[in-house]
Image (cartoon, rainbow, N blue to C red):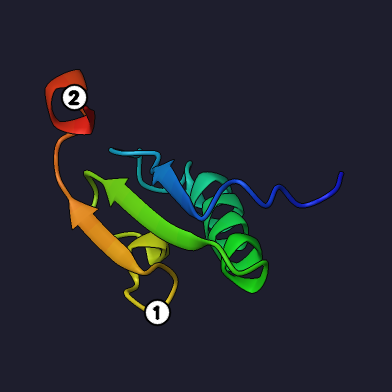
Amino acid sequence: MPKRTDIQKIFVIGSGPIVIGQACEFDYSGTQALKALKEEGYEVILVNSNPATIMTDPDLSDRVYVEPLTPEFLE
């Protein structure tokens, strides 16, 4: 798929609360997505309600928000 040149920023919604021992796949795949988007040159903005994930590492996104994943906040 060719890169879209009309998009500069991408808003990524994290997986939120997880069950210990059952969610490393979500965190790993989300982390890989953030890395790929950054490598493509996009500005990446992440919101996740779980601060204890690798995804919330500030080096993976341009901006990280640890906030509830509610419609009110995400708007």
Q: Quadrant of residue 71?
A: top left
| Looking at the image, residue 6 lies above or below residue 45 | above
The residue shown at (36%, 46%) is: 20
**Residue 13 vs residue 53, the one in the foreground:** 13
Q: Amino acid at mark 2?
A: Thr
* Helix, strand or loop status at disc 2: loop
Residue 3 pos. (x, y %):
76, 52
Residue bearing mark 1:
59
Q: Residue at x 14, y 44 (%)?
A: 67
Crowdedness of circle 2 by 10 Å Cα count: few (<14), some, many (20+)? few
In this picture, is 8 found above or below 23? below
Q: CA distance from mark 2 to mark 1?
A: 25 Å
> Considering the image in quadrants, where does the C terminus appear?
top left
Quarter of the figure with the N terminus: top right
Q: Residue at x 67, y 66 (%)?
A: 40
Q: Which residue is mark 2?
A: 70
